[in-house]
Amino acid sequence: MVPRSDANAGEKFQQLIALMARLRGPGGCPWDREQTFDSIKPYTLEETYEVLDAIDRRDWKEVAEELGDLLLQAVFYAQMAEEQRLFGIGDSLDAINQKLIRRHPHVFGEEQAQSASDVKRIWGEIKAAEKKDQGKANAGLLDSVPRAMPALVEAQQISSRAAGVGFDWENAEQVIEKLHEELAELAEARNNGSPVQLEDEIGDLLFVLVNLARFVKVDPEQALRKTNAKFRARFGYMERELAGQGKRLEDADMAQLEELWQGAKREQKP
């Protein structure tokens, strides 16, 4: 077993909190001191994607480093909140600790859960009860899904919420039928529609693909990220091969590019 390196994690976390307070304090870093909740948001998103990228590449040393960067974002927000007497990092830690215990009664209580689907059901029931206690029971089912998240992730979440109350197809085959229906509507829009109609049909097609991914238990965001990485690698292979011949991509015709593309696919096979 790999030895754990977090025996003094609490002490290290306290050091991070102190460092952030020092950076924001008098005589600290001018850049850190001028940041606001809104100015930090883009960095939070960037750090999140860097964590995902490192995981995709299975670069565990970099995953550890990127998780540290992501953790800094939480401490940064909490420090700014502390300065404005809104809340502190302890409040955030209390909130997540209590939530984990409250939403896992099958671990910390008497509830029974034999499968992941049982856990999802329990989780949903507890969330509904929490909303009722908070006076949010009348809010729309999809209101809690943030609109600012990446569109693929948003589509995945809102379709999952709708499916949770029974608004769903019965199986993947029905989703594939809907996919063909949307493709036909897209073809018609290409022939007769306006740019607005084309955009609408492309959106419908993407939404159905997200639902198909949900039925076959594939994360569409991660699937697309991996395909993007695959395309980058194959395209880079084509550039290197042509450079070795003293050529550029612009110098090759489509037949040559296709041959190089197939070579790249063969190169990538395990």
Image (cartoon, helix red, strand yellow):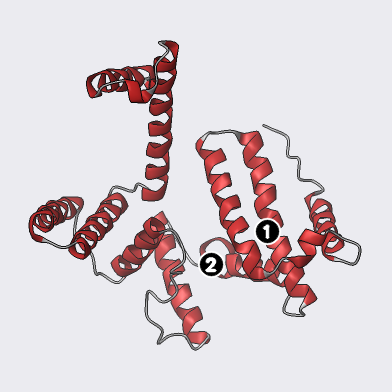
Depth check: give the residue in front, 257 or 62: 257
**Horizontal relation, residue 30 to residue 181: left or right:** right
Depth check: give the residue in front, 239 or 180: 239
**Horizontal relation, residue 209 to residue 222: left or right:** left
The type of residue carrying mark 1 is: Gln
Q: Residues within 10 Å of mark 2 (few under 14, many from 20)?
A: some
Q: Residues within 10 Å of mark 1 (few under 14, many from 20)?
A: some
What residue is at 32 percent from the left and 67 percent from the top? 164
State which quadrant residue 84 falls in: bottom right
Residue 105: which numbered mark, if any?
Answer: 2
Residue 209, image x, y percentages: 26, 52
Q: Is residue 184 above or below residue 144?
A: above
What residue is at 52 percent from the left and 34 percent from the top? 57
What residue is at 16 percent from the left and 63 percent from the top? 194
Furthest toward the top, the residue is 245
Q: Circle 1 sits on which residue?
A: 73
Which quadrant: the N terminus? Answer: top right
Which quadrant: the C terminus? Answer: top left
The type of residue carrying mark 2 is: Pro
Q: How many angstroms separate mark 2 from mark 1 (CA)?
A: 30 Å
